[in-house]
Amino acid sequence: MTQPQALVLDFGGVVTRTLFETHDVTEKALALAPGSLTWRGPFDPASDPLWQAMQADEISERDYWLTRTREVGKLVGEDWDRMETFVKRARGADPDATIRPEAVAAIKRAHESGVRLAILSNELDLFYGTELRQRLSIIPLFETIVDATYTGILKPDPRAYAAVGEALGLPLQACVFVDDQQRNVSGAKKAGMRAVHFDVLAPRQSYAEALTHFGLVL
């Protein structure tokens, strides 16, 4: 069996805390009353029909977030049609504060142990913007970033996984992929990657599972 050499991470939800987890921060940043944002996605699926529709592949993840972007824009009396606007307004002051501490620990552990690092995202710059991610201190640790904002190829399309393998110069069997969307994890496995489903309710355990593929402990 090919030995794993690279850790490939999704970005939103895996490296960063989800917007579901930071409603209080968003409400404060946008001067909204506490409790104004009620959608909770994976943290309370029963109360979020739109999230359920996305999980059922009735709408895309981009559709979900565009809807939420427009809703929040209306709450502040503005017309928002780009997720980047939402993220910048909600998180722009200190983007490093939105990074999961578990992600920082795991990424540094992998990097120090010689594991190659890559990001495979469907909407990194589309959602976060180039300026915002350029301010994140951990980004320089990643050897390559494959972002469908530019490629137009969304996970779980097998070409998305092939692109990150090609960028790394590695067979997909040598890559361990981590994503919080099960369909993307399933797509990675079909493409030949080792894959870990990231549980946003248990981030440390998820990162620990990913690192075990390299014989590392978090």
Image (spheres, rainbow, N blue to C red):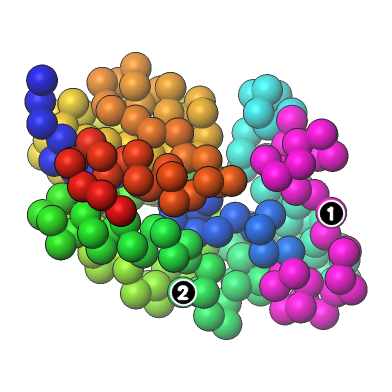
Compare residues 161 and 148 and report the one nearer the observer: 161
Instruction: Give me the residue at 21% from left, 54% from top.
Output: 110
Q: How many marks?
A: 2
Q: Which residue is mark 2?
A: 96
Question: Helix, strand or loop at disc 2?
Answer: helix
Is 22 left, or right, of 14 in this rendering?
A: right
User: Which is nearer the N-term, disc 2 or disc 1?
Assistant: 1
Is 110 left, or right, of 70 in this rendering?
A: left
Residue 155 falls in which quadrant of the image?
A: top left
One can see residue 131 in this view: no
Residue 92 falls in which quadrant of the image?
A: bottom right
- Going by the numbered disc 2, the residue's amino acid type is Asp
x and y, in percent, of residue 91 in the image:
60, 72
One can see residue 52 in this view: yes
Which residues make up the magenta segment? Answer: 24-52
x and y, in percent, of residue 5 in the image:
13, 41
Question: Helix, strand or loop at disc 1?
Answer: loop
Compare residues 84 and 98 and report the one nearer the observer: 98
Quarter of the figure that contains the N terminus: top left
Q: Is residue 155 above or below residue 33?
A: above
Is 36 included in the stretch rendered in magenta? yes
Is 80 included in the stretch rendered in magenta? no
x and y, in percent, of residue 139 in the image:
31, 66
Instruction: Give me the residue at 72% from left, 78% from top.
Output: 29
* Cβ atoms at labels 2 and 1 below 8 Å apart: no
Q: Which residue is mark 1?
A: 38
Q: Is residue 48 above or below residue 32?
A: above
Instruction: Give me the residue at 75% from left, 36% from top.
Output: 45
Is 131 left, or right, of 34 in this rendering?
A: left
